[in-house]
Image (spheres, helix red, strand yellow):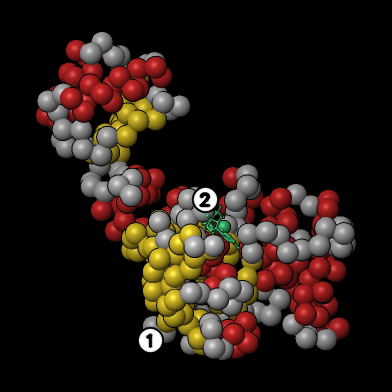
Amino acid sequence: MHDVAIRARGLSKSFGGTPVLTGVDLTVPAGSLLALLGPNGSGKTTTVRILTTLLAADGGTATVGGHDVARESVAVRRTIGLTAQQATVDDLLTGRENLELFGGLYHLGGRAARRRAGELLDRFDLSAAANRRVATYSGGMRRRLDLAASMVAAPRILFLDEPTTGLDPRSRAELWTVIRELLAAGTTILLTTQYLEEADQLADRIAVIDNGRVAADDTPAALKRQVGSERLALRLARAEDVPRAGAALSAGPGDAAGLRLDADAREVTLAGQGPDHLRRTLDVLHRAGIPVEHVDLRTPTLDDVFFELTAAA
Ligand SMILES: Nc1ncnc2c1ncn2[C@@H]1O[C@H](COP(=O)(O)OP(=O)(O)OP(=O)(O)O)[C@@H](O)[C@H]1O
Ligand SMILES: [Mg+2]
């Protein structure tokens, strides 16, 4: 049986007359992880705030754990945990004190709050630092404590708003492990991220949000397929050649479908279309006097997917 844990239909929201959400639809089956992927300002936090009852939508409906977010906010709040984008833990308290404080907020009672804090410190690998003030924690430790705080009441449904933004790769990987464990234990998770790799690593489904609506909603594999079977990547010898290469390929006889330029990486990528296309492409660059340093045919990344889905807007 596949219960739906989170369902949103046509959510809209404007701030001061500026539309931010213009009809967001989302469905998250119980026990799965949906990654809501989008650039800065695309409305991820706004969506999370509506689904966690912190903000009223202008239009549309949403249920979380079967409860309507507008009419049954108390029941929704009892069902969920939220790790907000801005840290919610207190720097001046220790990790343990923070978790006990949250226990109090959830009416756990002193002994139960202490026990729960101890369990979570263990689970999130913070026991050794439990009695240090949070001000002394690294970014990764803080994020783990944030996550632990949102788990105090053992919620079935968890909202994680950019849980790994700003973390180094190692801390990010540690947090991913914790998230996978929560998922394995049956928690439903809606996670927002700007990292395509993160969505690819963790998500059962990825919803790409752009211009206030969901531009694509599919499995990571299906999203990658949508962009075509392969990408042809050409690394040029000189960064200053990149714009010229783009112009030559667009004007040339070869097909420049899906052309993208990245001067920083000295890279020109386009949809791969087999050996003849590769030869024509290299010919065009050769005739333009643009040396190519490296040629690569690769399966599309989520970056490619994202670009494809949002570039036209
Ligand atoms: N309370 C508010 N008042 C006015 N504008 C707001 C408010 N909250 C959000 N916005 C605007 O709505 C848009 C979407 O913001 P939101 O925080 O949802 O984006 P986001 O996808 O979470 O971005 P980021 O990746 O930077 O966190 C932005 O243009 C933001 O400035
Ligand atoms: Mg945000």
How many dots with numbers? 2
CB of residue at label 1: within 8 Å of ligand 1? no
Tell me the quarter of the image containing the N terminus: bottom left
Helix, strand or loop at label 2? It is loop
Residue at label 2? Answer: 40
Give neighbour class at mark 1: few <14, some 14-19, many 20+ (Cα, 10 Å): few
Q: Is residue 266 above or below residue 6?
A: above
How far across and how far down the image is residue 252, in percent? 16, 24
Q: Who is closer to the viewer here, 73 or 108?
A: 73
Which residue lies at the image location 86% right of the left edge and 62% below the top edge? 94
CB of residue at label 2: within 8 Å of ligand 1? yes
Q: Nearer the viewer, mark 1 or mark 2?
A: 2
Left or right: 5 as drawn, with respect to 276: right
Give neighbour class at mark 2: few <14, some 14-19, many 20+ (Cα, 10 Å): few
Helix, strand or loop at label 1? It is loop
Residue positioned most to the top: 289
Which residue lies at the image location 57% right of the left edge and 70% below the top edge? 49
Q: Who is closer to the viewer here, 213 or 290?
A: 213
How far across and how far down the image is residue 307, in percent? 35, 45
**Tag 2: amino acid:** Asn
**Tag 1: amino acid:** Met
The CA distance from mark 1 to mark 2 is 36 Å
Q: Quadrant of ligand 2?
A: bottom right
How far across and how far down the image is residue 79, in percent? 59, 83
Q: Is residue 281 above or below residue 66?
A: above
How far across and how far down the image is residue 245, in percent? 28, 21
Residue at label 1? Answer: 1
Query: Is residue 30 visible from the viewing direction of this image?
Result: no
Query: Is residue 119 visible from the viewing direction of this image?
Result: yes
Which residue lies at the image location 85% right of the left edge and 69% below the top edge? 97
Left or right: 300 as drawn, with respect to 197: left
